[in-house]
Amino acid sequence: MYAIVKTGGKQYKVAAGDVISIEKLDAEIGAEVELPVICVVDGSAIEANPEKASETKVTAEILDQYKGKKQLVFKFKKRKGYKKLKGHRQQLTKVRITAVGSEKYEK
């Protein structure tokens, strides 16, 4: 069984026990959070209606809060002598999916 969750403007395919990095959530390390579900696949049945799929609970445990790798933004205009270099590091949260519906992750 797996689900498609939406957080931080992105969608992720998750199953119980998966560890993913998502955009920063305001919660402490070790806290349990619930992620919004938009699709659930359970063997042969697929629930793609977001209203019905949101009844399925996806819970996650926060493992870490950290910064991602530096992304460079380079602006350039040829033959004009215009160059700008800027860096950005996204704030990320590493989470472990503990349960998708009735399916639980065992350590």
Image: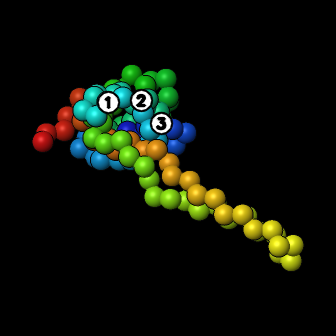
The image position of residue 38, as x and y in percent, is 47, 33
What's the distance in space between the residues labelled 3 and 1, CA to CA? 17 Å
Q: Quadrant of residue 37?
A: top left
Furthest-right residue in this view: 80
Q: SS of the residue at dot 2? A: loop
Residue 89 drawn above or below residue 37: below
58 and 56: which one is in front?
Answer: 58
Which part of the image, by quadrant, shows the N terminus?
Answer: top left
Q: Is residue 43 visible?
A: no
Q: Nearer the viewer, mark 3 or mark 2?
A: 2
Q: Quadrant of residue 58?
A: top left
Residue type pointed to by label 3: Thr
Q: Quadrant of residue 53?
A: top left
The image position of residue 15, as x and y in percent, is 30, 43
Query: N-terminal of the two: label 3 or label 1?
Result: 3
Residue at image coords 43%, 25%: 54
Residue at image coords 64%, 59%: 86
Q: Is residue 74 visible?
A: yes
Label number found at residue 55: none
The image position of residue 14, as x and y in percent, is 35, 43
Residue type pointed to by label 2: Asp
Label 3 crowding class (10 Å Cα cut-off): few <14, some 14-19, many 20+?
A: some
- The residue singled out by tag 3 in the image is 7
Furthest-bottom residue in this view: 79
Residue 33 drawn above or below residue 8: above
Which part of the image, by quadrant, shows the C terminus?
Answer: top left
18 and 15: which one is in front?
Answer: 18
The image position of residue 102, as x and y in percent, is 23, 29
Label number found at residue 26: 2
- The residue singled out by tag 1 in the image is 28
Q: How many circles with numbers are drawn on the protein?
A: 3
